[in-house]
Amino acid sequence: MKEVLEEYRIERAKLEDEIQEFLTQKIADFKEKTGAEVIHLDVNIELLDDHDANAFIESVFIGTDL
């Protein structure tokens, strides 16, 4: 059981890293297009109970200095 939990934590950390990289790129694209600085970012991620299921970015709220 301990090994399964550790595997889950590792996979979740990888997923969180992928989401962070994706959002970082999208924010950089947004700044390049608008010149706006992101001052607040709120992300809701939906993780299903099914261990084989993917996570989904459910919603993103971005506050800017515009």
Image (cartoon, grey):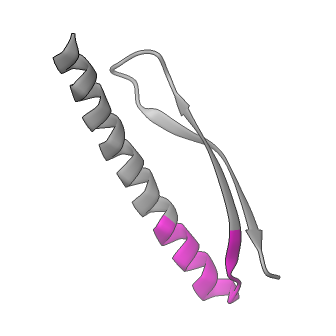
Q: Residue at x 71, y 84 (%)?
A: 36
Q: Is residue 20 above or below residue 48?
A: below
Q: Residue at x 23, y 27 (%)?
A: 6
Q: Nearer the viewer, residue 25 or 65?
A: 65
Residue at the right extreme?
66
> Can you tell which quarter of the image residue 45 is in?
top right
Residue at the top extreme?
1
> Can you tell which quarter of the image residue 13 is in?
top left
Q: In this figure, what is the number of numbered marks?
A: 0
Q: Is residue 11 above or below residue 20?
A: above
Q: Residue at x 27, y 20 (%)?
A: 5
Principal secondary structure, stretch drawn in magenta: helix
Residue at the front extreme?
2
* 64 in magenta: no
* 36 in magenta: yes
Q: Position of residue 9 (x, y in %)?
A: 31, 32
The range drawn in magenta is 24-39
Q: Residue at x 41, y 15 (%)?
A: 50
Q: Position of residue 22 (x, y in %)?
A: 45, 60
In the rendered image, which quarter contains the N terminus? top left
> Can you tell which quarter of the image residue 35 is in?
bottom right
Q: Is residue 22 above or below residue 28?
A: above
Q: Position of residue 3 (x, y in %)?
A: 17, 19
